[in-house]
Amino acid sequence: MRALTNILQLGIKELRSLARDPALVILIVYAFSLSIYSSATAIPEAPYRATIGVVNEDPSPLSYRILDAFQLPYFLPPQAITHAQMDSGMDEGRYTFTLNIPPEFQQDLLAGRHPAIQLNVDATQVSQAFTGAGHIQQIVSSEVTTFLQRYHGQDALPVEAVVRMNYNPNLDRSWFGAVNSVIDQITMLSIILTGAALIREREHGTIEHLLVMPITPVEIMLAKVWSMGLVVLLASSFALRFVVQTWLAIPIGGSLGLFMLGAALHLFATTSMGIFFGTVARTMPQLGLLIILALMPLQILSGGQSPRESMPEVIQDIMLAAPTTHFIELAQAILFRGAGFAIVWPQLLALTAIGGVFFVIALSRLRKSLN
Amino acid sequence: MMTPGESIASLKNVTLEYGNSRKGKTRALDDLSLEIPPGRMVGLIGPDGVGKSSLMALVSGARRIQQGSVRVLGGDMADAAHRRRFCPRIAYMPQGLGKNLYPTLSVRENLEFFGRLFGQDKAERDRRIEDLARSTGLNEFTERPAGKLSGGMKQKLGLCCALIHDPDLLILDEPTTGVDPLARNQFWELIARIRRQRPRMSVLVATAYMDEAQRFDWLVAMDTGRILDTGTPNELLERTQSDTLEQAFIALLPKAKRAQHREVRIPPRQPSDEIAIEAHGLTKRFGNFTAVDHVSFRIERGEIFGFLGSNGCGKSTTMKMLTGLLPFSEGEAKLFGQPVDPNDLAIRQRVGYMSQAFSLYGELTVRQNLELHARLYRIPEEEREPRIEQMFERFSLESVADSLPMSLPLGVRQRLSLAVAVIHKPEILILDEPTSGVDPVARDSFWELLIQMSREEQVTIFISTHFMNEALRCDRMSMMHAGKVLDSDTPQALQQKRGAPSLEAAFIAYLEDVSDDDTDAPAAAEVPPAVAASPADAEAPMRFSARRLFSYARREAMELRRDPVRGILALLGSVLLMFIMGYGISMDVEDLSYAVLDYDQTSTSQAYSLNLAGSRYFVEKPPLASIDELDERMRSGEISLGVVIPPGFGRNLKRGATPQVAFWVDGSMPTRADTVKGYVQGIHMDYLKTLARQAPIGVDPASAGVALRYRYNPDVQSLPAMVPAVIPMLLMMIPAMLTALGVVREKEMGSIINFYVTPVTRTEFLLGKQLPYVVLGMVNFLVMVVLAIFVFDVPVKGSFPTLTVAALLYVVCATGLGLLMSSVLNSQIAAIFGTMIATLIPAIQFSGMIHPVSAMEGVGAFIGHIYPTAHFLIISRGVFAKALGMADLYPYLIPLLLAIPILLLISIAGLRQQEK
């Protein structure tokens, strides 16, 4: 009981400190509103306005047909270029793709001479290069097939493949981007707030003052965990409710309450992590660097930026120890796929376990660093 | 008595207010006018919070003038040109031990920094440092870090730093507060000697010690932002018919205030058998340094026990050990007969502690601080309010109840700390120099309170102090020096033992017995004039000086070197992150899990699904039994693709009825879903082709292919694609974070004052801070390139010089961005968070690392077009992968070149040249 009031009071003190730093409050508001909005809207539909240059040496109905198939928003209108421009344009990054339709392409096709269109891909444009190349191949071959069928008077394929997208029928990237950036901000803010709050207490000597009072390190730590966790939780539910659902009009599949439970558990782990960094770093500048070192892998390797299954096995295994991995899985399951408790309980369990371990480690470090 | 033209500084109707209008302003100076005569030692006396420091900050140019006029050295201090011209002739030493020093730099490095700042060449600098160090006795400690000096030495060093450029006006704000009496004497002798050598120099000193004021030529007595009286010490004494300046000052106070003051009377104490605090052979070692050396004492219940000693003699350490804050190396200590146990919370409830440095929450108001502590000490709710009110009254805090402590003067803050320490009515009070910086009236009323608690409530008080008259009031006291107790007894007995006329003389006698060269500087007396000629008269310093810039750069570099963890983190961190991201980010989506729901179960349908299983992109999971199962397993994330082969697939195919195979793709991750779609269609096409070939009669196998060629990375490996993209990203984030705290940290720690009062322009200050980190960033860059070539096997195909030039410009941008955050924001937390926001998202998401900038829309596209990473990324990819050189890439250097001055200009605009 006594411990609880201490934790409550110390937490309120943290909240008051935060309120005294208007610049920080503005930054938090920005991070959970405009920043999410701009991340979500920056990248539109697949494969997103790819640039194409075309050297068309066969002005035939078929070649125009193929070129017409490259439509916005997937492709910017193909630019007619010459051979020379093809190389320089790719060097300068003006075109991610260049197509070269050889002379007498249509004629050769109909004569069964199996002509080939040359497609050059700028492989440095990572994601676009790989998905875009597939799309272009797809477009070319389906145009060619349709053309041939028309020519031969056939109208049906022997088998049709119907691809349907679950949960996000139009593969609207802003859905994913928005939720993902909410998750990133949750992790980033909670680690920075708690870590820096601890260092500040040390730099200003206030932690010493706390320790002569009838207060234990656990109470000091729990106070920071709940108060900073609450700030982030409120900010993120605001972001989901008003920025994601209302402003961006993204439908959310599952229960927001369940997601918030997951977020709270995640925050338990990340705030403990923040405290841990606060005990490792001796000064604020060191903390700043440590946070970068921790946050970048957390954001990049947890499955939020690129799918986990395509990472090397070792990294996949190591990242199982990171709370973000489980939180992202949980968030995707709940928010997009409408999963319920029955499905996400393993993630909730993992988050609790990881949070518990981080908390214990951070607490023992805190105890040691205070002595 | 003086004509204005003669005075060195002249203030007319000056008013200065702190705080914002919403919370109510505190008036520090109230329509004050003053002429300060030249060539004299002028003392500002008065309690804390009467505006002494504000007045000094205005005269030195550290603070912006709000109302009225301030003329110093014949010019208007509101005029920036005048300030720039005359700043070099003014030296300002702010309040607080070593506040203008850099704790990690050595004595010599601190002095050199200030020397360089004022444009002295090496020979001149060395001569001056030699002179000053010798005359202050610092010459033996020139290599010691300033943070490790004792309080007196810090102040001497601060003085040397102030004197290094021969100022005409020396402004010292409470230079001896917190310094032991021996060191204090030496300090004033030093000032007197320097004044003998340089009679033209005027000195303006503020002090809280009235006995010191006797030494000054001319005094200004201040109260509540106004001047009470001015004159020589003797004039003041005569006018008020007092014996001491302390009495004189009290006599000068308005009646209402005088009424509060009473002589402190100490009623005799009833001896008690109960021992409250007991220590035997208490010892504390830090490494091989013994801070406290076998200290023993017994303090009876209700006794006032004093510790007298200089800073760093072990007083604070002893007290911290008693409170359980520090474990001790040897010996034992008991509170109420029980050994000190840091985990015993019950004992803490009975102890009140006040640490030397202000350690309350600056972000909470006075009332909130008291409330927090009242709650933490579990004062019952009904008692809480009255107790807080009582504290307000006892410590006269009502008027500032809703102010933030940081806006209050030191003395008021000390009162607040004390109020917090006694709010729970402790039985033992451990007070570490509670009255340093508190004015005489407040000090006396504070002692009354202590005496009352001791005599009436039997509270044991263990107090350390610098003030002799306070030590005299203790029941018993110990004199401490260098970790050892010199002697303990009643103050009177100690005096008698040494046959000294005063306690101070007794203490000095004890000190001289044990003193080493650390505190004594006899040789100093014969030192020749420290400074030869006066400086070139008021020659306007150049608007931009590379020397000043480099002196800041050098200092920053030294600080960076003293904190090797940061440099190592920066370098190792980028290596580590490069590995993680180089190997971790992979754009080829592989090993996608899928499951088949085959309603047909014929050999044809199995052949179709086998087609899929053969692909290297897919991993097959156990087959599905129903659509519901598909739903559920996809929802849990187990499979990302479900294939549904309809009933009658084989039959319909043969009949030419075009059966449909449904592919359900998990769309929650659009990039992955897209890739899956592509793969599926590709595999389906293959199937169709195989089908066509097998067909007895069928489609003419005429077809067209697409010859796919991946340029610059023919094998489509992730590494060669990622490495050139990871370098720009890391080279943005790490250098930006390194500089992000550069300025804001000085703001939080107080050393920003050097920037306010020395002739450094904002450009020099910012560029100087940036330079070392640009160098570190370039080292970082080279390490990453070497790593790319030799470890990741990603060669630099194009022009390396082009890449290096671009990297240099880019690092300047990155560090500039960090500095911008640092200049504009006011707290370190905000600066870290702001820098993360300003680098992480734009660098990873908007700069074309994963998705090209041309594909962006909205705000992201805008940021992508102006953000430096986007341009450097093109250069990096161009040089690494496309074998390009300057001729192709120069257009991308232009935005970087433009960004540098823009970032600098915004930083300059965000950085104030004076305190507001």
Image (cartoon, helix red, strand yellow):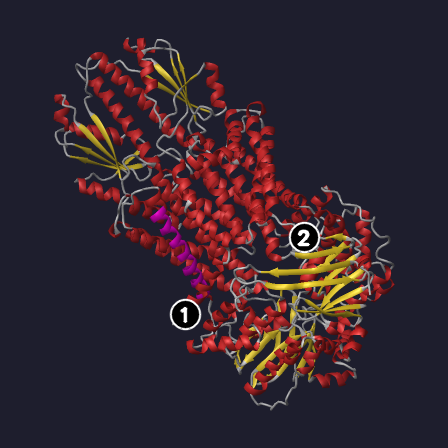
Q: Nearer the viewer, residue B582 or B840?
A: B840
Kindly state the secondary structure of the residue where label 2 is placed.
helix
Q: Nearer the viewer, residue B161 or A216?
A: B161
Picture coordinates of residue B861, whole percent (x, y): 45, 34
Of the numbered discs in the image, which one, if any, rests on residue B275?
none
* Highlighted magenta segment, given as a residue range: A219-242
Q: Nearer the viewer, residue B625 or A275?
A: A275
Q: Nearer the viewer, residue B251 or B379?
A: B251
Left or right of B832, for residue A44:
left
Most distant residue in the bottom direction: B270
Q: Is residue B384 magenta?
A: no
Q: Residue at x 61, y 37 (%)?
A: B901
- The chain ID associated with circle 1 is A
* Dot 2 amino acid type: Tyr
Picture coordinates of residue B85, whole percent (x, y): 76, 48
Real-space Cα distance between discs 1 and 2? 44 Å
Picture coordinates of residue B135, whole percent (x, y): 82, 61
Q: Where B482 sits versus B148, above or below?
A: below
Left or right of B560, for residue A298:
left
Of the numbered discs in the image, which one, if any, rests on residue B756?
2
Main SS, magenta region, reads helix
Q: Where B397 sits versus B133, above or below?
A: below
* Residue highlighted by disc 1: A5
Q: What is the crowding at mark 1: few (fewer than 14 residues within 10 Å), some, or many (at least 20)?
A: some
* Dot 1 amino acid type: Thr
Label 2 near label 1: C-beta < 8 Å? Answer: no
The quadrant of the image that shows the N terminus of chain A is bottom left
Q: Is residue A129 visible?
A: yes
Kindly state the secondary structure of the residue where label 1 is placed.
helix
- The chain ID associated with circle 2 is B
